Image (cartoon, rainbow, N blue to C red):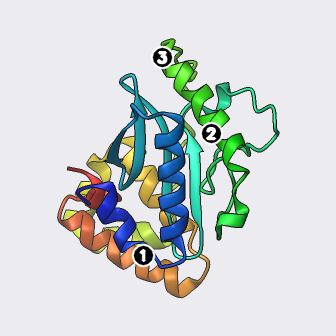
Amino acid sequence: MKNMDEYIRKAAPFARPILLHLRALVHKACPHATEAIKWSSPHFESYGSNLCHMAAFSAHCAFGFWKGSLLEDKQGILRAQAAMGHLGRITSLEDLPADKVLIAYIREADKLNKDGVKLPAKSPAEKKELVTPADLLSALKKNKAALQTFEAFSYSNRKEYIEWITEAKTDETRAKRIGTAVEWMVGGKTRHWKYKK
């Protein structure tokens, strides 16, 4: 994805007006904001820091603030950061807060960047012991190259594959993911190899 115009153009028809509206609000609130595609989704930056981001999925859009946990949230519109973003599932323009409300939040986030406020450092989480599912381990043992790749992976790379497989909702999906994982690992690929430059 080269730029935001291309991202919006390729989004589902329901998502385009939402993305265009959010983009316009960001630039209205923060005319100096710049645009970038990061982690495969549109981001806005100000004063050299991430400001906010948006994304379109198959049935909803999401919008979030990079420093959302530091915003005052006087209107009580922010939800915990998750796949849905800070505004929850956005399926139409009616799901968005009033323009003036969202503009105020964007300006507050911009001021945090201008003032050089940083997010608090995350305390290093204790790494849980990874348990490789038996069906994945069995498939890896049948392919020496995939097994060697998996064993050489960092903790986080192994965790990404394990979570992807264990989160499958059906046995069929799980089996398909295991097959794909083995295929990718034969090529030395991490779970999110498509998104790495």
**Number of marks:** 3
Q: Quickly name the residue at label 3.
A: 114
Question: Can the viewer see residue 163?
Answer: no
Q: Position of residue 165 (x, y in %)?
A: 49, 68
Label 2 and label 3: CA atoms lie apart by 16 Å
Left or right of residue 185, residue 77 in this image: right
Checking the image for residue 177, the label placed there is 1
Q: Amino acid at mark 1?
A: Arg
Q: Secondary structure at mark 2?
A: helix
Residue 100 to residue 50: above or below: below
CA neighbours of label 1 inside 10 A, class few (<14), some (14 to 19), many (20+):
some
CA neighbours of label 2 inside 10 A, class few (<14), some (14 to 19), many (20+):
some
Give the residue displayed 52% in from the left and 76% down from the top.
58
Q: Are marks 1 and 2 in contact (CB under 8 Å)?
A: no
Instruction: From the image, state whether disc 1 or disc 2 is nearer to you.
Output: 2
Residue 136 to residue 38: above or below: below
Q: 58 and 102: which one is in front? A: 102
Q: Earlier in the sequence, mark 3 or mark 1?
A: 3
Q: Quickly name the residue at label 2.
A: 103
